[in-house]
Amino acid sequence: MILVAGFSCTKVDNLPGPNAGFKGRIIDKTTSANLLTETSGMQIKLEELSWSATPDPQYIPSKQDGTFEDDKLFKGHYRVTPYGGAFWPVDGVELDINGTTSHDFEVTPYLAIKNLTNSLSGTTLTLTFNMVAPIPDGLPQIIDVKPFVNDTQFVGSGANINNYSDVNKITLNSNYSDVVGKTYTLTIPSLKSGRTFYARVGVRVNDSFKQYNYSDIIEVKVP
Amino acid sequence: MKRFKYIITITAGLILASCHKLAVTPLNILSDNAVFSSATGVTAYFANIYSSLPIEDFKYEQNNGFNQDWQNFYHPGALCGELVGPYGSTYDGAGGFGYWPYDKIRTVNVLIETLPKYASSFTDVQKNQWLGEAYFCRAYFYFALAKRYGGIPIIKTVQSYPAPINELQVHRDKEVDVWKFIEDDLDKAYQMMPETSVRGRANRYVAAALESRAMLYAATIAKYGSANFVAGDARSAGFVGIDASEANAFFQKAIDAAKLLDGKYSLYQKSADKVKNYTDVFLDQDSPENIFVKDYSLPSNTAHSWDATMSPRYMTADGLSRAYPTMEFVERFTSLLITNADGTPKRFTNTGDLMTGLEPRLLATVYFPGATLRGLTFDTQRGLYEHFTGTAAAELSSNPPNQQFRHLSGSTDALFNGKRIIGFTGVSTDGDDKTRTGFYVRKYIDYNKAQADCGLYKSTTSWIDMRYAEVLLNRAEADVELGNTSDALTTINLIRTRAGATLATPGDITVDYIRNERCMELAFEKHYWWDIRRWRIADQILDNTRYHALLPYLVLDENKYIFLRENEPFQRSYTFEKKYYYEPLPGGELNKNPNLYPNNPNY
């Protein structure tokens, strides 16, 4: 009996596992550097076309440094599209994913934070900057600019200290023509003494996703 | 010889058996004839359809669907800041539950196709009434689909099955065509049905009321959805979104349909006490305001648990509460006077003193601290201050001066200097089975019910799916959108008079004012979620938004109460992504039928 039971189940799954991978960078066309984003600030949409013309999409979330990687994919023919971030929509490309496939995408962000300065007076942090749109025509309304402050280097809309961040935002709801050339100042008062904080500025437009274009991250040591 | 005997017997047996006619009507399947040739058969058939109507009643949950269990606090208002409590975020319910009632629609279509074959058994009036009801029910199903998904396949005949797969794999219709189909069905329903009906079933005015609601939805989706939308293939193809130019015609239809109910229904005004009167709107079975209701009973196992799950356990026999009205909701009526001119918190001898002078409708919608129910007081108290100096603003800043003298507790048993730190009705630092905002829902709470009867599955208060106040609000909203401000003013003041509110003046009448009136009047009736969706403002008002509480404290050295307007203690944040303006088509259906692609944008 035991022998029968033992032998009855020996069929091995001989189909290949998800042993392919896909990785790459999402590059800001205007600076040729990685797009400034946050963890899951955008996705790579994967549609596997090997089996169906209308597949259920799967998504690889971005890392904070503007790269992405998924090493548990099935090999096959995919349409891949950078998606859901603060950049002008782009069309996908079709490619075969086999082994570890690398592909870099180029996108144009809606806005860039330029000339960022920061100064600390007592426990109040002041950030000044202006905003530049690489493509001004047809830019959706600019909703708001926000400081994001956190006590780790992972800082963005998904990781911040709310009392320093959201409450100090400036609501704009303005067209780009009302914003261009202006200098904006964000003030973050009452930072806790003796701590090190990481701060950046984010701005978002009223597109389908409402994600942020970010500045670089600055380190702030509060005495 | 013996062998022959057997052979003969068996052969004879076979011959006898073979003569049985097999075309006997099976007794375990009801034939068309049995159902559609008698009034009782048709009535029983309708009972099945009505019981499956997607009425978003006490037992409806946005993420799980209809006829859910006792946890009636899973209220869609708690996804979007009308209430806070059981849901962690807006995302928990925004994707819906994959509602796809084409089996029910088929049941209706079978009746529409089959009943005319038995027309000779009935009078024309009778037959038309039933067909009208069928059109009403079909529109009701399609309305529930359209508000979730936008354009979905319109199926108005009985598909034959089995059939070639390509006949069954239908395509989506455009969103605008679905709304027009709903309108068309409701027009037919209105024309075919009589003026009155038995309780819980439709008559012509029920159809008109639904039409005013549906047309208002279509109109606002056309007007606001064409400005605030998510781009995608489904939108380019018209499966979601309606051209803005259609808006005004839909608004006009909402008004026309609403006007059909003029003089047929009236606002409930039986009691001179405005608070009692407004409370009874939702409890009196014989309200002239009720247009379409759903009843419950203990013997049929349909009773709900509203009483046991919207009030604290302190006042009920079983269950627990988890959903609480927000300060922001209360502030739709008025801002509460809890601080003095110098910014210090106002001192109150009793917490209930805050209710003095508030709009009766507000007091009948929400239980304030200090209110009473079943002989018990809402002794809501967040904690104690040994003493309190300075302003409320300073106490709520990041360096609160009095916090070291503040005492909070998770337990109602905890004492400080012999005084209970929190009330039996909250606010506790543990759990959420006592209020987190200082308020409790009052609407639909049956104050006449003895505490011992307020158990789970023990409430039989009827759900009012459509009431005349909503029809008036539909009309007023469409009016103001079309610039008929004087009709909007008259209409809105009918509602405000009954509410015991100050009357609106012509200068008040704006879109925002009418919307606010709707949010107040129809609070907790499961409209708010759909309203902020169709106005396309949900992504703006739910944008990493945190809601507030009205928290009472006893100041010990003064023996007075103060109120602080604080973040609700769990500090949940709510964000509505733009793609939630439409739910995704159910994945299982997309797998069965690739012709349903493209799915809604961003899914």
Image: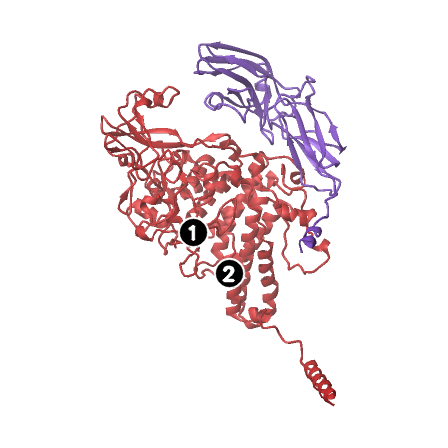
Chain colours: A purple, B red
Left or right: B187 as drawn, with respect to B343: right
How far across and how far down the image is residue A95, in percent? Answer: 76, 32
How far across and how far down the image is residue B169, in percent? Answer: 69, 52
Q: At x 41% / y 41%, what residue is drawn?
A: B322
In this view, the mark in front (1 or 2): 1
Judging depth in this view, the residue of A79 and A16 nearest the camera is A16
Label 2: which residue? B193
Question: Which image quarter holds the N terminus of chain B?
Answer: bottom right
Judging depth in this view, the residue of B447 and B514 nearest the camera is B447
How many residues crowd mark 2 within 10 Å: few (<14), some (14–19), many (20+)?
Answer: many
Label 1: which residue? B464
Is residue A88 visible to us here? no
| Cα distance in 3D space between marks 1 and 2 | 21 Å
Residue A181 falls in which quadrant of the image? top right
Is residue B111 visible to us here? yes
Judging depth in this view, the residue of B415 and B322 nearest the camera is B415
Left or right: B28 as drawn, with respect to B387: right
Q: At x 39% / y 43%, what residue is drawn?
A: B321
How far across and how far down the image is residue B316, in percent? Answer: 33, 48
Vertical placement of A27 versus B291: above or below? above
Label 1 secondary element: strand
How far across and how far down the image is residue B332, in percent? Answer: 40, 35
